[in-house]
Image: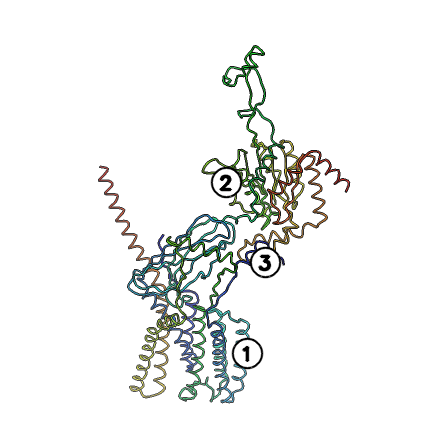
Amino acid sequence: MELRIRDKIFEEEWKKTVVSTPGSSILVVAHLLFGLFAIAIIIIQSAFSFNVYIFSIWLIFGLIIFLTDIFRGSNIKLSSELGFGFFFILGTVLSLLLGNVYSMFFPENLGRIDILVFQISAGICVAIRFLITFFYEEYFSQEQEFIVPDSNYSKDQIDQYVLNLVKTDFEYKDIEQIGLFEKWWYILKKMIWPSISVSILIILAVLYSLLIFYIIPENAISELIIVPSLMIAAILYSILLIRLNEVIPKMQEKEKKILESDEWEEDLLEKTDEEIITS
Amino acid sequence: MEATKHFELTKNGKAFILFGSLFIILGLAIENYLLVVPGFIFWIVVTSTFISYFQHQNLNLDLKLRVSKKYMRSRGLLAVATEINNSSSKAVRFKITLGISFHFRSIKTPETVYVKLQPNETKKLVWLLLAVRRGNATIGPAEISVGPFQNLFENKRILKEKISIKVLPQRPRVNIPWKTKKELLLKMVHEFAQRVKGRGDEFFALRDYLPGDEVKHIDWYATARHDRLITKEFEDERNLHFLIYLDLGGTMFGPKFEYALSSAVELSSLIRGTNHDLGVVAYSDIVKRFIVPQLGKKELSLMLNLYDLEATGVQSNFIDAVKFTKNNKLLHSIAIIFSDLEGDMRKKLQGLNLLRTMGGRVIFVNYSTIDFNILASPGWLLSKSQDMDYSHVIERVFPSLVKDEYKRREKELRNILYSVGGDYIEINGYDDNIILSLYRLMRKYSPTQRLVQEALERWN
C-alpha cells in the first residue's frame, strides 16, 4: 500500500526503534527449559519405577506445556503461568491415584532419599520457572519504544533544540538508568529478609515436630500432629498476608483523616483571626 | 499538585498467595515436596512485596512535571522535565513512567526508565518528545513504582496532573510568496467587489448638500457652477466578505479532512491581515461552529479555534448551513465551500441554489476522494494512534463511488455552478494548494475566456 507523502517523509527522517532488555531471549529459553526439566525429572523417575500410566500422563502434559510455551514465544505473562500450575496440580492428583510403590507420588516413600532428591529437584525447577516469570514481567517484558533521528535534517533539528535548551530549566541530558545487574541485585536483596522469615517458620515447624517425635515416639501419632500443624501454619500465614492487604488501605485512610483534621484546625484558626481583624 | 500514594494487592498477587498455600497444603497432605518447594517460593515472593511496602511506607518523593511550551506545531520538539526529590534518608531505586498521549513520540529515551536516587538528592529527568499528530495532546500522569514485583503488589506514587498542549499542523512545505497572495487578493477585489459608497478615499459621485454632511467635503467649484451647495461622495474601501463553509461530515475524513482544514486555515490567514471580512461556518448535520475573527489580540485565536474542529462522521447537511447564514443575514461577496462529491449530492445542489438567492459568488472546492483514497492507507487508519471511528466511516464511504458516477456528479455540479455564476476547483492530493488553485482560477477569470471554455467543454 502506498504511504501518505507526509508519512513517507516521517519514515525517512525518523527510525522507530524497539529495544528489549539484553538477555531477554536467554530468559525465555530458560523459562521453557526449566518447565521441561521439572517434567523430565518426573518422567525419568516414573521410568525407573516402571509406571506406564504416570509416564504417559506426564509425557502428554509435557508436550502440551512445551507447545503452548513455543506458541506463546516471548510473551511470558504471570496470568498465563496459571495454566502451567493447573496442569501440574492435575498431573499430581492423577498420578497420586495411579502411583505404585516405587513412584515418587506414593505417600509411604517419603523416607527414601532418592525419592526426596527427585521431588525437591523437580520442585526447585518449577520454582525457578515461576521466579523467571516474575523477573521477566518486571524487567524484561517491556519492549521500550522510541524514535531515533535518521536523517541529517532531524539530527540537526535535535541538536539545535538541545542547544537552545542550555541554561533553561529543560536542559537536556541523557538519563542515567540502572544497569541490569543492579536490577537483579536489587530484587534478590529484597528477597533476603522474606526468605529468612519463611525459613524461620520452617525451622520452627521442624523443631516442633522433632519435639513431638521425642515426646511421643510413635510414628502414627507424630504424623497426625506434625502435618496438620504445618498445614494450619500455612493457612494462618496466607490469611495473615491477605489480612495485611485489607489493613493497609485502612491505615492510609487514618493517615488522611489525621491530615484533614490538621487542616481543619488551621482553617478555624484563620477564621478566628479574620473575625478578630474585622471586629 | 501532590503525588498520591497508591497501594494495591493485584489479582495476580491474591492468586499467588492462594496458589502458594494450596501447593503447601496439598504437598504436605500427600507428602510430596514437589509441591511444597514452589509453595514456599511463592510465599517468599509475596512476603518480600509486603516487607518492601513497610520499608518504603514513609518514603517521600516529591514530583514535579513541567513542559517547555503549550502551543506547538506538528513535527516540532517538546521538552518535558520531571523533578524528583528524595527527602528520606535511604537510597531508592524506582521505575518512573511518563504518560504521554498518542500525539507524541519519545526520542532516544523510552517512556519508562529505571533510576536510582541517593538520600536528599534531587534529580531532573528531561524527555525530548516529537509531536507527530495534530490535536489537543496531554502530558501526564507520571507514575513512580517503588519496590519489587509490582505486578503482585502495586506500590506507586502517582502525579495525576495532566498538562494539555495544543499541537497545530506542521508548517506548509510549499511557501507561497506574498506577492502572489497580494495579486490574488487584488484580482479577487477587482472581479468580485461591488462599488459601494462610503467613507473611503476614492471619489464616487457628486450630489446636493444635505444638512449634517461634512463641510470639508463640499466641492466649491461645482457649487460655483450650479449655484447651490454640492458635496462630494466617496467610495467605501472595497471590502470582500469571505464566507468559508467547511464540511465536517462523514465523507470528509482522515487525511482529506486534515488537508481541507489546513487549507481553510491557510486561506483565512491570507485574509486575516487585510481589510477584508471573513467568517467560517463549520457544519455537519447541523452548524457546529461559526467563527468570526476578532481584531487585535484575539486575531490569533481564530487559527486556534479552527484547529479545534474535528471530523464528526455524520452525514452533512449543506442546506442547513446555508439557511443558517441566510437567517442570520451574513452577507457574503465570495462563498468558498470546502467539501467533496461524496454522500447525498442533492442536499449540496439545493444548498447551492439557495446560495444563489443570497447573491455573491460561489467557489466550490472539491477534495477529490479518488486522489485522497490512495493516501488514506489502511496502515494509517488502523494504527493505534488513530481514532477508530474513522475505520467505520471508511467502510461506508470507500466502495460508494465508481469513477463514472464521480464524473457524472462533477458534471452536474459544474452545470449548477455555472448557472449560479460560480466556480469549481478540484484538489487532487497533497500536491495541490488552495491558494495556488485560486490564483490559477483568477488568472483565467475573464468572462470571454470562460465562455470559450464552456463552449469547448460542450464541444468535447
Asked where in the image residue B288 lies, by quadrant, the reply is top right
Quadrant where the C terminus of chain B sits is top right
Q: Is residue A167 left or right of residue B345?
A: left
The reply to whether label 3 and label 1 mark residues of one chain is no
Distance from disc 2 to disc 1, alpha carbons, whole Å, reads 66 Å
Name the residue that disc number 1 marks: A63
Measured as percent of width and height from the top left, residue A170 is found at: 39, 54
Which of B153/B120 is in front?
B120
Q: Residue furthest right?
A: B459
The reply to whether label 2 and label 1 mark residues of one chain is no
Residue B243 appears in the figure: yes
Q: Chain of mark 3?
A: B
The reply to whether dot 2 and dot 1 touch (C-beta < 8 Å) is no
Measured as percent of width and height from the top left, residue B321 is found at: 59, 38
Name the residue that disc number 3 marks: B379
From this view, report whether residue B156 is shown above or below residue A27: above
Classify mark 3: residues with Cα within 10 Å, few (<14), some (14-19) or many (20+).
Answer: few
From this view, report whether residue A267 is shown above or below residue B332: below
Which element is circle 3 on? helix
The reply to whether dot 2 and dot 3 touch (C-beta < 8 Å) is no
Name the residue type under label 3.
Answer: Gly
Which element is circle 2 on? helix
Classify mark 1: residues with Cα within 10 Å, few (<14), some (14-19) or many (20+).
Answer: some
Which of A23/B251 is in front?
A23
Residue A251 appears in the figure: no
The reply to whether label 2 and label 3 mark residues of one chain is yes
Measured as percent of width and height from the top left, residue B163 is found at: 42, 51
Name the residue that disc number 2 marks: B302
Name the residue type under label 1.
Answer: Leu
Q: Which mark is residue A249?
A: none
